[in-house]
Amino acid sequence: MLDSFFKPKSVAVIGASREEGKTGFSILSNLINNKLVLAGLPSNDSIGGSKRGFPGSIFPVNPKASEILGLKTFPSLENIDSEIDLAIIVIPPKFISSAIDDCAKKNVKSAIIISAGFKETGAEGARLESEITSKAKKLGIRLLGPNCLGLIDTNSNLNASFAKGMPPKGKIAFFSQSGALCTAILDWAIGTNVGFSKFISLGNKADLSEIDLLSYLADDPETNVILGYLEGIENGRAFMEIAKKAVQKKPVILIKAGGTSAGARAASSHTGTLAGSDKAFNAAFLQSGIVRAMSIEELFDYAILFAEQPVPKGNRLAIITNAGGPGIIAADAVENTKGIEMTQFSNTTLDNLRQKLPSTAGIFNPVDVIGDAKSDRYKDALEIVLNDNNVDAGLVLLTPQAMTDVDNIAMAVNEASKIKKTIMTSFMGEVSVRNAINLLQENGIPNYPYPERAVRSFARMAQYAETLNLPDEKPQIFDIDKTSAANILKNAIDNGKTTILDEAKSIIEAYGFKTPQMILAETSNEAVKTAEKMGYPVVMKIASPDIIHKTEVGGVRVGLKDKSEVKNAFLEMTSQAKRHMPNAIVLGVYIQKMVKGKEVILGMSHDRSFGPLIMFGLGGIYVEVMKDVAFRVAPLLRRDVESMLEEVKGFPILKGVRGEKKSDINALIDAILRLSQLVTDFPEIIEMDINPLMVMAEGEGVVAVDVRMGISSR
């Protein structure tokens, strides 16, 4: 439990300062917040009559002062004759290890290290941070930070930070790896009167991390929505497990920065080239049920809706507007946003709208109550529409005309919220709608300056509603020959191999993949004899342990129809391989029977945060150019694979187009699940491509034509 961070009865500030402008002064001042809470004095003794400060005991620690901001100051923790729940440390890094020892002597179980100068500064700082973290762990002390802003709990009136100001009380909890972002958002929250339950700056995450906070905040009765800003995650698997549990209790909305290049590394496979940190985070968030925001604007657009409005039962949206243009814009936004739809009203709703609205009004979705509409017309339209069982949510648009009674319309929206369906507004403008927006906000109705932002926010809420309704599912386990695969891998690693081809084929065969017969021909005559026996058409591939990407050296020929083509191909392929890679060992060529089907690529790369990352895309040599691929974190559920397939733009080709037969999609799903099981079983596999995997007609299965693996003994 982290209650001693958020609900302490007493706080010590180690490094409290008398000098205004110093961090130690700001933190102490924020704790007091004009309230005098001296040990031994009644808690209602105050300065200036303010009752807003932290209600517990505050103990400044500074060996060079006897009093700061009206509080008795102590030379050290051991001089304090009271229990201390939380220590806030604001001293130079070299003294913090000793301060942790002092905390242990006083039985302090929680500490916030504000001070910077640790791993963010280099090797020596990292060493010092590791030393302090190890010591705290041995002594049973939990740490927040170092290099952090601190934390705020509005319900405890605890401002244990050096931020400027205290946000209003609310239902949103926010944690961030960026302290500077915290201060900006706090200022925004105060200015816009958006309430928060908790604000936490994680800093370097030496101990407490987003995993600890997700676990704690999921059970926090004062929090309805969890927001977070992340730059990285150390233990992706643990994070996903905690997140899956948290989102069943309340929405988790995160923004992840630094994904465009973070996690990139040299890679020899298609999968490794196409994968990256951001793709892994996208997949992990999607599979965990986390709502991902792509900007700060989106983060708080989503937050205000989730914090105040009920989660809809479905994805069907109704729009009520007094202006045609904004209504059309909103409808277009719905049509262009995946996962939501414009609802169709029941006949009863249409009849009731005809009776209540002028003949010039638009009664189909969007409902246009026209420009001269006043609050009574909005009220009628809202009640009729929101009571339709086909409607899951309502978006109310308003542009201020001369005759528009804006404030009364806001009150009509507030009244309609009693129907207990998701309601959003977009009262467009500024001066004329400002008071109405405040009225809406006071009643928990989020307003968006533009309809598109409201539509986007509803889409994320509908996505979350779908997550809540997903059945409990476990990864499918196939009957495979794990022992054979393990032996092959061990032998390859023992022999110092880092890339395997033939062995990789045997490994996936052990996991149930079908592969075409492949025969080595060392001479052109052997190639012809093999092809004649196998039957035309055939495929020829250069046989070399040193040539990974065969097409780049002209090492693949397909559709060879007779012995002349086979003989010529053999001579050309082997000579080109020698010319392009003179030092490569060329064993000859492999002959395969031509396999007909749709080409796809399956792959896997190792993400440093989440582990094995599975890729699917339409295959061939152009996959890196087209980049029409999807990723998920292994192990996969069947629904993960199904959504993965739908994510790829070219997937409809496999469903059959222009009279073509439907491909064996069930066999493809099984193949991806088998791949997931394989790379979950063997972390030694760090990179892999099955390219191409041929997907045959429905009922005929899939065939893995070519495979390569990158392996490691780690």
Image (tube, rainbow, N blue to C red):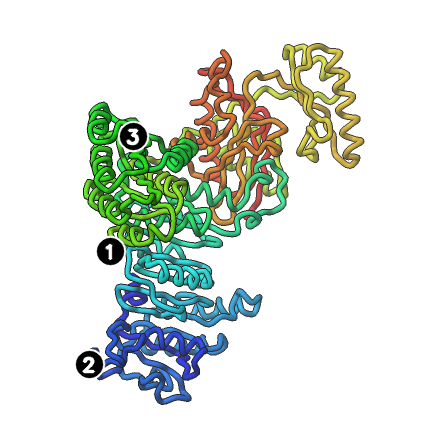
Residue matched to label 2: 42
Q: Residue at x 68, y 29 (%)?
A: 550
Classify 10 Å Cα crowding around label 3: few (below 14), some (14-19), many (20 and above). some
Q: Amino acid at mark 3?
A: Ala
Along the line of sight, the residue nearer the viewer: 314 or 580: 314
Q: Amino acid at mark 1?
A: Pro
* Mark toward the start of the polypeptide (3 vs 2): 2
Numbered tag placed on residue 221 in the rendering: 1
The kind of secondary structure element at disc 2 is loop
Left or right side of 89 for 257 = right
Q: Vertically, is 60 above or below 446?
A: below
Residue 471 can be seen, yes or no = no
* Mark toward the start of the polypeptide (1 vs 3): 1
Residue matched to label 3: 361
The kind of secondary structure element at disc 3 is loop
Q: Amino acid at mark 2?
A: Pro
